[in-house]
Amino acid sequence: MLKGQSSKVFENAVNEFASLPGIGKKTAIRLVLHILKQNPKEIEQFGSAIIDLSSKIKHCKICHNISDEEICSICSDSSRDESIICVVENIQDIIAIENTQQFKGRYHVLGGILSPMEGIGPADLNIDSLEKRIRLNKTKELILALSPTMEGDTTNFFLYKKLNKLGIKLSIIARGIAFGDELEYTDEITLGRSILNRKPFDGKIF
Amino acid sequence: MLKGQSSKVFENAVNEFASLPGIGKKTAIRLVLHILKQNPKEIEQFGSAIIDLSSKIKHCKICHNISDEEICSICSDSSRDESIICVVENIQDIIAIENTQQFKGRYHVLGGILSPMEGIGPADLNIDSLEKRIRLNKTKELILALSPTMEGDTTNFFLYKKLNKLGIKLSIIARGIAFGDELEYTDEITLGRSILNRKPFDGKIF
């Protein structure tokens, strides 16, 4: 209960916002007061946009990306190369990769990564559908684009074991020091690996 | 347009959240994905709580606090002393003062403070209704509880000029060094005033 608050409607809205991650009571109050300043139409639009999330969002039957249709716009885009599949952990990663404008293939969303600590096993991820997809379609290359963490690498290794026998090209996104990083402050593992995995240099920065 | 986003419903919700103050695109995506993980009922509840803000919230006819009824729960609470009115800038300040549990009178929300820079004059604030309220009711004391800023003090002075002639007791919340502050880091104005306005000490911390 918000002390000094004479409106249950206000309080309900504040509590809903405060239930979101990273938003405390004070921020929630600030947000609701901001919304209150808008005109009724705008407020209804905001509310409807959230309600629509409950009823109108589907998951693409092919890649598990969120979608308004049965098949998402990336999977139904015939200009994109369907022989290359990029495996990502979640939807945010698709957005991040699309922002680079460097990939014109298709995606497959695992919906998480293997994590024995959190009890997430292979059956919890969209791995079976990935295997089926590779078997049925003319997939040539699978790019593993998971985060370079302990869990990410466990998942990479699991996928390698499971999918390598299918006779497709398996690749993994490059690791090394990031653009803008200073060597002095780069962690030892990354710096050590970047020397071991050095590439021939022909005057062009890759 | 969110690149790599195949769902307009998702995008709409993200844009609505990103329109809130202090919430960027990435945070908005995180929040919407969090909401998507909840069950449809919870999502609808969230949306409805926002829509209700557009239709069900009123402003109290007496003190201008937000309210579900014509008269807010503070103004209609007969156990609260109606002879003392505490003047605040906005609704957040009522919440802050109520949290202290030190005030059992009524409030009056100005809806802002005088600010020539932002073009906010006396006519934009709930000052006339405050004067009427004092004239009509048996108000004994008016507590000015505005922030101790340049604009706050301008407003305090304006209210003093306008309301002092009504023959009520006018008071202002105490200023000085805050609990937990270190003298060494207190600004000169505050520290200087706290010495000028020192109080007799009888062994009890006030």
Image (cartoon, coloured by chain):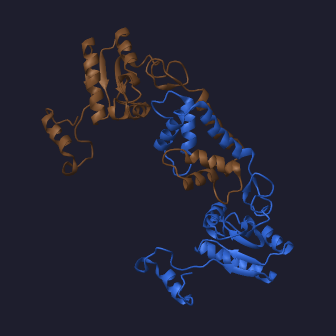
Chain colours: A brown, B blue
> For residue A41, what is the image quadrant?
top right
Total marks placed: 0
| The C terminus of chain B, quarter of image | bottom right
User: Residue B79, position in %: x, y?
Assistant: 77, 66
What residue do we see at 27% from left, 35% from top? A150
| Above-or-below relation of B148 to A140 | below
User: Residue B93, position in %: x, y?
Assistant: 63, 64
> For residue B49, what is the image quadrant?
top right
Q: Is residue B82 left or right of residue A25?
A: right
What residue do we see at 83% from left, 71% from top? B132
| Above-or-below relation of A110 to A7 | above
Q: Is residue A59 left or right of residue B169?
A: left
User: Residue A26, position in %: x, y?
Assistant: 56, 56
What residue do we see at 28% from left, 23% from top? A158
Residue lying at the far top in this picture: please name it: A136
| Above-or-below relation of A106 to B94 | above
User: Residue B193, position in %: x, y?
Assistant: 53, 85
Task: State the residue in front, B32 or A117.
Answer: A117
| Above-or-below relation of B104 to B6 | below
> For residue B47, what is the image quadrant?
top right
Q: Is residue A87 left or right of residue A19?
A: left
What residue do we see at 81% from left, 81% from top? B166
Residue lying at the far right in this picture: please name it: B136
